[in-house]
Image: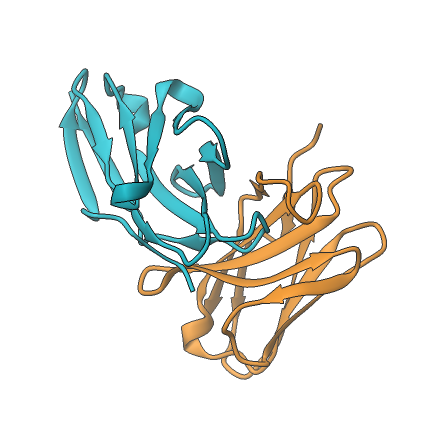
Chain colours: A orange, B cyan
Amino acid sequence: KAGVTQTPRYLIKTRGQQVTLSCSPISGHRSVSWYQQTPGQGLQFLFEYFSETQRNKGNFPGRFSGRQFSNSRSEMNVSTLELGDSALYLCASSLGRASYEQYFGPGTRLTVT
Amino acid sequence: AQSVTQLGSHVSVSEGALVLLRCNYSSSVPPYLFWYVQYPNQGLQLLLKYTTGATLVKGINGFEAEFKKSETSFHLTKPSAHMSDAAEYFCAVTPNAGNMLTFGGGTRLMVKP
């Protein structure tokens, strides 16, 4: 079974631009979660989607948004990029709402200049 | 609210020596606890998890962890370190069996030949 895939793997953007990251979960998984990883703040939960509905949201500004499609693929969008948004963005998928095991993708490395 | 503290951001051991990575948590409800490993330029891989039942849990690659409620700890151990164990290790908690993980700051394990 193919693992979680994230595209693109690397991205360079300029302050003020917006960016969309994509995540394809493992086949059959219905829950997708997003995390931000930075050297200063560590790993922080962004949001979770299950069956196209946002189920949980972390403490991030409204510039960070996401969605999930009927095939469980998910996208996250960051508008008006700031230098501090430079991070590794990780997507994780799991079977359901409480499956205890999340499988992580390799991440998208976003650099904001 | 829950939180996770990992004592020691860097741990160095000799090949063949015992590995002990410390994790303490706080949670207002019975926690579900996880250890993940991250190799350079990769996502997170689940090593082991504690949900309910037996407090000593065994994971992949020879790692195990013991849930000690009285000490609010979930330390990770491996009897004999391999060079291939060099990576960053993250302890995580979720209070409600959901998919919203709170991570510790991580511990970078270095293995000396």
Q: Residue at x 69, y 32 (%)?
A: A2
Considering depth in this image, is A65 or A47 the residue closer to the camera? Answer: A47
In what quadrant of the picture does the N terminus of chain A appear?
top right
Q: Where B18 sits versus A63, above or below? A: above
**Res A113 visible:** no
The quarter of the displayed image where residue B77 is located: top left
Q: Where A82 sits versus B15, above or below? A: below
Q: Residue at x 43, y 24 (%)?
A: B59
Q: Where B112 sits versus A32, above or below? A: above
Residue B99 at what x, y percent from top left?
Answer: 58, 51
Q: Residue at x 83, y 50 (%)?
A: A71
Q: Where B13 sits versus A72, above or below? A: above
How many circles with numbers are drawn on the protein? 0
Residue A33 at what x, y percent from top left?
Answer: 61, 55
In what quadrant of the picture does the C terminus of chain A appear?
bottom left
Residue A26 at what x, y percent from top left?
Answer: 70, 38
